[in-house]
Image (tube, rainbow, N blue to C red):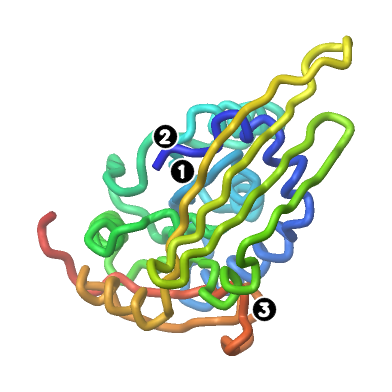
């Protein structure tokens, strides 16, 4: 499942179209709606810590978990600059461990789509349920099957001053697996030289019903689903869906 090794160095550069601050406002609104105005919150699949930083700035005591050492190195650089008190852990979301429970767990930028097997998806929900305070909330987003079908088999390329990438996308409708091959070119030094990194990423399309079934099998309770971070109901052409679940009792893992 490890991803974003070379691409980690230019991840923020090419993700500058993600409205993190807008998403953060909606996350905070959802957390407060369920009585969570402060306390410990886990950012699962935190990447370079962009959302982790914003939630820490909103007054939450943040923990970030990611399985990419390179992404966490960048998150630590942000932490040093902001001086926010954030704990980062290098762990896989399929078997993460915490020292205690948290009031809420969030996961953004389609991290849940990287869980390719149903049994592993249920395990993530079990772990989240296990580490949530009684009645705690899990909020995450996911790419929809509609989005993957729209992307289909195409090539996307971007060229920036400090780096560029070529993204070859393939969607297998039968297996519901989206594969994208990344060729990343990162500028190094002042001599105009670039280092090339190649990565392959896989994501699975899940329906809201499948996510709900996996969560309920893990002991969680469905609360709501939205069209992305808009607060509106999902549509047939929603490309991103935000889902909210609640801790509902715990069985030992």
- Residue at x-position 13% and y-position 54%: 253
- Numbered label attached to residue 89: 2
Specify the quadrant of the image occupied by residue 131. bottom left
The N terminus lies in which quarter of the figure?
top left
Specify the quadrant of the image occupied by residue 47. top right
Question: The residue tagged with tag 3: helix, strand or loop?
Answer: loop
Disc 3 crowd, CA 10 A, few/some/many (<14, 14-19, 20+): few
Whole-angstrom CA distance, mark 1 to mark 3, is: 25 Å
Does the CB distance between marks 1 and 2 fall below 8 Å? Answer: yes
- Residue at x-position 49% and y-position 82%: 225
Residue nearest the observer in this picture, 207 or 132 = 207
Q: Is residue 117 left or right of residue 68?
A: left
- Residue at the disc numbered 1: 63
- Residue at x-position 49% and y-position 57%: 107
Question: The residue tagged with tag 2: helix, strand or loop?
Answer: strand
Disc 1 or 3, which lies upstream in sequence? 1
Does the CB distance between marks 1 and 3 fall below 8 Å? Answer: no
- Numbered label attached to residue 230: 3
């Amino acid at each position: 499942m490890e991803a974003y090794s070379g691409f980690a160095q230019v991840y923020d550069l090419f993700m500058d179209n993600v409205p993190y601050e807008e998403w953060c406002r909606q996350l905070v609104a959802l957390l407060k709606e369920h009585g969570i105005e402060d306390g410990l919150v886990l950012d699962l699949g935190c990447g370079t810590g962009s959302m982790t930083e914003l939630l820490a700035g909103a007054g939450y005591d943040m923990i970030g978990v990611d399985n990419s050492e390179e992404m966490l190195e960048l998150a630590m650089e942000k932490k040093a600059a902001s001086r926010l008190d954030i704990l980062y852990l290098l762990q896989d979301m399929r078997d993460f461990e915490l020292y205690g429970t948290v009031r809420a767990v969030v996961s953004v930028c389609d991290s849940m789509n990287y869980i390719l097997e149903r049994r592993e998806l249920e395990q993530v929900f079990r772990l989240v349920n296990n580490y949530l305070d009684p009645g705690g909330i899990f909020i995450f987003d996911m790419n929809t099957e509609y989005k993957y079908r729209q992307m289909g088999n195409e090539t996307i390329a971007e060229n920036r001053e400090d780096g560029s990438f070529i993204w070859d996308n393939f969607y297998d409708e039968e297996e519901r697996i989206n594969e994208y091959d990344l060729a990343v070119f990162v500028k190094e030094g002042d001599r105009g030289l670039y280092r090339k990194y190649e990565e392959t990423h896989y994501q699975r399309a899940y329906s809201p019903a499948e996510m709900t079934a996996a969560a309920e099998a893990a002991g969680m309770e469905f609360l709501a689903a939205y069209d992305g971070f808009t607060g509106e109901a999902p549509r047939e052409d929603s490309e991103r869906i935000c889902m909210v679940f609640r801790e509902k009792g715990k069985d030992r893992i």
